[in-house]
Amino acid sequence: MKKTQSLKKNSFKLFRFVVVLVGLIGLMGLSGSLFSATVSISTGSVGKDVEALRTYLDMWEKDTGNTARIVTLPASTTDQFGQYKIWLGNKNSDIDVYLLDVIWAPQINQHFIDLSRAFSKEAKEHFPAIIASQTIGKKLVAIPFFTDAPMLYYRKDLLSKYNTKPPKNWEELKSIAKIIQNGERAAGNEKMWGFVFQGNAYEGLTCDALEWINSYGGGSIVDARGQITVNNPSAVKAIDFMATFVGDISPPGVLTYQEEEARGVWQLGNAVFMRNWPYAYSLGNSSDSAVRKKFDVVTLPRGTTPNSKSAATLGGWNLGISEYSKNKEAAISLVKFLAGKKIQKLNAVNLSKLPTLPALYEDKEVLKAAPFFATMKDVLAEAVGRPSGPTQKKYNEVSKEFWTAVHAVLAGDKNAKTSLAELERKLKRVRGRKW
């Protein structure tokens, strides 16, 4: 009798063990829904960026069982940064991963976790200068997603038609643009313009105008030592000359153009030249583009002063994880995936985004999709940085004062000598005793 009871008791224990085991196996199988994390990532909306990011997130979801959602912001980096400061200032935990402009790390680094330990291996694979730009003290604020440096887009079919070559300096550009613009208008395209760029009063104009000044030998807005250097004869000459473009070879509406407005005019076939970032290359060759296979790119023109050179503002976007995120481990997993070689290569091939991994500049598939990448390593090596390092948390105010001063000259409200002198006084007030 006792033996029978013992057997029944042992059988019941075995049954319970099997039930628990099956349950655990079931839970492991359902871990994607029961134990997964939902990670939110914020990004601006330019070109096909959001569509591509969604594809990458779907891949990560499949690999990890986690879920990722996109919080889309306006294309304007100025608007994006303003929203970021509001969220981070309120210690908002809804956003886990932030897509950060290369200039933002010094200004808001206290709101992001230190990635130096989690990415100790990966950080060594990226361009050292980009990692350095995202490192404040010993803290790695963000890991590179892609880098950026603008180029001059030109209609190779039209330059060939008018028997000319890409311009070496800005005066040549104006002359060539005027000839082709007038010729094409006479041939029936009344919408043709010579040159489009980012002339709106926002961060994009800071990038454009910094290139103009530097290409004329005028240096930067604030130098590496923190000295305000923008008010100089070369800078005055550069800004005054570029202002002559508006209404002549550039449409009056260029004063409201950001990247996408400039690309829109260009891609419809209504501009000879365009200053823009590499993302416009793949879009310009899309099946619905009027300029498909009709254009090429070269480095931006230099100035006409003795110490002139081609200048391209360093751009780029990086991935930072919020200090207030409730899903930090999953966020680290996502950032490692997005910053890795697989996604950087997809970005390069499909979206002509410049990789931050040097090895990809020698990848045959990448070079086939974007042949101009072969020269971009040299361009990046000489790229002009915005003075976010020297001015630190005051950079945004410095940039706003700069683009406002330049926009006033482009609009014809002031000349460059007056505007830059006023800008110098304003920047001294912004600086105070120190940056």
Image: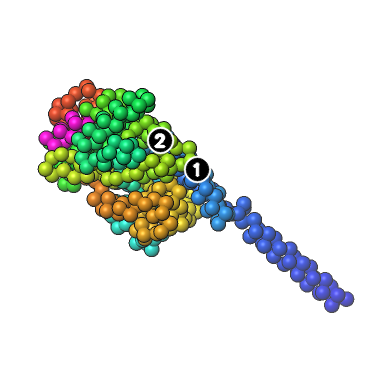
> Residue at image x 33%, y 41%?
156
Residue most extreme to the top: 413
What range of the chain is rendered magenta?
233-243
Secondary structure of residue under mark 2: helix
Q: Nearer the viewer, residue 123 or 302?
A: 302
State the image quarter where residue 270 is shown: top left
> Residue at image x 13%, y 40%?
305
> Residue at image x 55%, y 56%?
64
Q: Quadrant of the C terminus?
A: top left
- Residue 6 can be seen, yes or no: yes
Q: Position of residue 380 (x, y in %)?
A: 28, 51
For mark 2, what is the residue? 267
Q: Main secondary structure of the magenta part?
A: helix
Residue most extreme to the right: 1
Q: Nearer the viewer, residue 186 or 205?
A: 186
Circle 1 crowding by C-alpha within 10 Å: few under 14, some 14–19, many from 20? few
Q: Nearer the viewer, residue 25 or 364?
A: 364
State the image quarter where residue 273 is shown: top left
**Callout 2, which amino acid?**
Gln
**Callout 1, which amino acid?**
Glu
Q: Is residue 55 found left or right of 251 in the rendered image? A: right
Magenta stretch: includes residue 91: no
Circle 2 crowding by C-alpha within 10 Å: few under 14, some 14–19, many from 20? many
Q: Is residue 278 above or below residue 132?
A: above
Q: Which mark is residue 51?
A: 1
Q: Position of residue 41 (x, y in %)?
A: 47, 45
> Residue at image x 25%, y 34%?
176
- Residue 431 can be seen, yes or no: no
